[in-house]
Image (tube, rainbow, N blue to C red):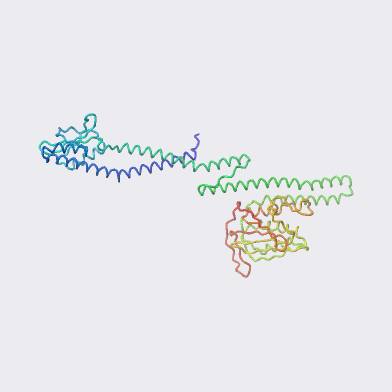
Amino acid sequence: MKPPPTLVSRHSLWLAGSFAVLTLWLIVMFSALVAWPMAHRAADDLAGLMVLSAQTWVELPPQTRDAFTLELRERHGLELRPATPDRPRGEWHAPLVWLLEDALNRRLEMPTHLHREVVDGEVWYWINLPVGQRGLAVGLPRDRYNSQPLVLLATGLLASLLLAWSAARWLAVRMAAPVARLEQAMAVIGQGRTPQPLAEAGPQELAHLSRHFNTMVGQVNELMSTRTTLLAGISHDLRTPLARMRLAVEIMREQPQAQAQMLDRLDAEIARTNHLIGEVLDLARGLAHEPPEAIELRPLLERLAQDYATPDTPVRVDAAVDRIVAPPQALTRALGNLLQNSQRYAKGQPVELVAQPAAGGARVGVLDRGPGIPADRVEQMLQPFQRLETSRSRATGGAGLGLAIVKELARANGWTLALSARPGGGLAAWLDLPTGTSAAPAGPATHSPPPFLPPPPPLGVSVRSR
């Protein structure tokens, strides 16, 4: 089976064909509007000069005719001689010769024709003019007009085709080169390696394509790094409960009287392991798309406050927004993780769950009075299995997946996660829902349902920190 043509060859043929058609059209228009009228005018002027020369020669005194003939030959390239018998028609002449013959016949009562004659190796064209008693023959050499329009048109057409093909080939290569570089970079990705960033230059469409490809490569690299970190963190955090469960089993074998206590310990370790697996699954599901729905925000926040409030760490709700359009499960999981993080590190201090209207959307934040996160470690804390406290003890912190899950949820739903130090101490974690999220201010406003909005973009929205 014949392979399909390359992008360069296909565009070269299309561009060359377009240039060739344009060149032919220009040649036809130039010939019809410029060259042909000029040739008619030149033939008419020459025919008038030939007739006038013959008539003048007849009317001159005999003693001045030789001087007139000499001047006519030197200045105008014309020759006079007595008329000769007409030759039969059928000779092939150049287009300008036919135009000259037609112009002469329009000035004569009896139609005649030019005939070709070779004089001393030079081609001449002669015509008999009925002047005087015997008539005169007026001749001119072929080099008198020295014009070859057909050769000119053929040469111009050939040169135009060559130029069109060269320009088309150059343009096609210029157009296909970025696509070829993209294909090579994708082949590098297919081999499991990271390609060099593509140059984000050239036409707008190609520059945008290169920019999106470079963004995709960065996301793939981040995804691979997250996967590696995730697997390493799981293997690390699972070793401790597995070791404890093995120890409990050994103790139960050696000390049967301690089975009840060991079973309780096994149950606790299994619960911790299950919780870790659940967090990992939450992180994996962070990229899953969920369609947005109209949400009554205040009831949602109050329900979260009841679920995560403790006697030592109450959760206060301050909602200045009644309704939004957002993926409900994703928003619930994200706010739940932020609340759980605040509960863990801000014990004994109240946590505030706040919703504020924003430009065309809403801001939902979890504000606590815990130790906060240093500004230089915010980005690090958004990665999986990262904790400020490095002991990895479950008593002093979680698995380090909470903020990473919120980050992935924000990325998948087009939100912006912002972590910043709270004035007076603590951490302020804000989820900025973009303009695609419909928000209604709180108060006695009407409760008509908000308009449906399309789902937010799945990827490509950066998760930033303040």
Q: Picture coordinates of residue 379 (x, y %)?
A: 68, 53
What residue do we see at 15% from left, 36% from top? 66
Which is more toward the observer, 113 or 57?
Answer: 57
Dividing the picture into quadrants, the one containing residue 132 is top left
Is 132 positioned to the left or the right of 32 in the image? Answer: left
Q: Nearer the viewer, residue 309 or 379?
A: 379
Q: Position of residue 418 (x, y in %)?
A: 66, 57
Q: Residue at x 86, y 51 (%)?
A: 261
Quarter placement of the C terminus: bottom right
Q: How many callouts does the rendering have?
A: 0
Residue with the most extreme bottom position: 444
Residue placed farthest to the left in the image?
A: 133
96 horizontally vs 326: left or right: left
In the rendered view, would you say 441 is above or below 5? below
Against 28, residue 415 (above or below) is below
Q: Nearer the viewer, residue 62 or 3?
A: 62
Taking the spot 79% from the left edge, 51% from the top edge, the residue there is 393
Q: Does 167 sit above or below residue 342?
A: above
Q: In front: 66, or 370?
A: 66
Horizontal and vertical percent for residue 185?
58, 42
Residue 233, given in percent of the width and then of the height, sits at 73, 47
Horizontal side of residue 205 vs 391, given as left or right:
left
